């Protein structure tokens, strides 16, 4: 079986991505209050720090999802067994969690292709190499793509004889506003054939105390992750942020139904961003939002599926029903 890597973020695509990055920063720093999207953090190092977050004892989304994969492995397998299939993972990162799904399929000698897609070239290269070292004599082929999600989906050949299942895990969809999430799942559906599947991880509404503990670890990994954004801005845009002049905290907002991570300027300061030809002023203790993690109800999830042209096949819960991996089928 083959194990390959392709970088789709070179040339024109990379230039377009850089422009999108700069535009997002300019727009976010021009609003009041200031607000930058969390996807800006995910360079190679940002992806590595986020992997640390998923291993924190109190970060329930990652632990709930592994529990779901272990408990509902047969349910997922029954959907796909009987024909050749392709597993496409958007935002694969290190792929550690997904191996809980992949390994039993390899052991059962099911023939399938795994296509991990991530904006981090380093993460995808490492993932493909790790999978090859473990499973090179198995029944799984791997095609790793360093790409934006939909560039990656467009880069794959559509074979109606192969059933696709798109994985979007880790409650990453919660990083989007509801309107953006609706557009996102609609674009996924448009990339697939009738009869294909989508499995999306959603963090469900729960006690704000549980949410606070999950996003404010005592070891400071969440703070390191959020403040890494300033390193990325310095490197990519020639800014002069000083991380030591900022602190981070996450807090559930009952108005937006989301955990919102803020970094606070500890003093009055002016930051220069050379690539944008812009100076940005921060007041003492002024907040800038860097993460947004929306918490869903089942009714919202089901509405999202219907609006995207899908039907809910199964909700897969952890034992405490804190989290759900919702499996949808693409319909006409």
Image (tube, rainbow, N blue to C red):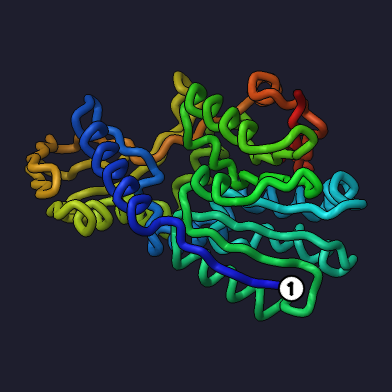
Residue 285, x across and y down, in percent = 19, 37
Q: Residue at x 86, y 69 (%)?
A: 107
Q: Residue at x 39, y 43 (%)?
A: 38
Res. 269 in view:
no
Q: Which residue is mark 1?
A: 1
Q: Is residue 329 left or right of residue 121?
A: right
Q: Is residue 205 left or right of residue 221?
A: right
Q: Quadrant for the N terminus, please.
A: bottom right
| Residue nearest the viewer, comparing 231 with 218 | 231
| Residue nearest the viewer, comparing 320 with 308 | 308
Displayed quadrant of residue 328: top right
Residue 68, x across and y down, in percent = 76, 48
Residue 174, x across and y down, in percent = 53, 35
Res. 229 in view:
yes
Q: Residue at x 52, y 43 (%)?
A: 150
Q: Residue at x 78, y 46 (%)?
A: 163
Secondary element type, mark 1: loop
Q: Quadrant for the C terminus, please.
A: top right
Residue 320, x across and y down, in percent = 75, 40
Relative to 190, is 87 above or below?
Answer: below
């Amino acid at each position: 079986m083959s194990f390959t890597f392709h970088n789709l973020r070179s040339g024109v695509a990379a230039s377009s991505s850089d422009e999108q990055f700069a535009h997002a920063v300019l727009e976010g720093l021009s609003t009041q209050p200031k607000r930058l999207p969390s996807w800006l953090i995910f360079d190679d190092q940002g992806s590595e720090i986020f992997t640390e977050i998923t291993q924190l004892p109190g970060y329930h989304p990652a632990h709930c999802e592994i529990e779901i994969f272990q408990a509902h492995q047969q349910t997922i397998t029954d959907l796909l067994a009987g024909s050749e299939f392709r597993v496409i993972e958007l935002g694969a990162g290190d792929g550690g969690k997904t191996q809980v799904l992949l390994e039993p399929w390899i052991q059962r000698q099911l023939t399938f292709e795994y296509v991990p897609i991530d904006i981090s070239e380093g993460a995808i290269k490492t993932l493909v190499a790790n999978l090859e070292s473990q499973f090179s004599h198995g029944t799984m082929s791997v095609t790793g793509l360093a790409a934006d999600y939909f560039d990656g989906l467009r880069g794959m050949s559509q074979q109606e004889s192969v059933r696709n299942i798109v994985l979007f895990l880790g409650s990453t969809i919660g990083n989007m506003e509801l309107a953006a999430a609706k557009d996102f799942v609609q674009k996924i559906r448009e990339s697939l054939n009738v009869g294909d599947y989508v499995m999306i991880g959603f963090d469900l509404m729960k006690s704000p105390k549980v949410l606070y503990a999950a996003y404010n670890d005592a070891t400071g990994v969440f703070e390191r992750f959020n403040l890494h954004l300033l390193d990325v801005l310095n490197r990519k845009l020639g800014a002069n942020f000083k991380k030591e002049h900022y602190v981070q905290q996450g807090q559930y907002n009952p108005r937006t139904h989301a955990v919102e991570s803020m970094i606070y300027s500890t003093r009055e300061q002016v930051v220069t961003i050379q690539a944008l030809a812009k100076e940005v002023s921060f007041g003492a203790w002024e907040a800038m939002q860097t993460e947004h993690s929306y918490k869903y109800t089942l009714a919202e999830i089901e509405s999202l599926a219907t609006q995207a042209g899908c039907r809910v096949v199964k909700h897969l819960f952890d034992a405490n029903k804190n989290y759900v991996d919702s499996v949808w089928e693409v319909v006409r």
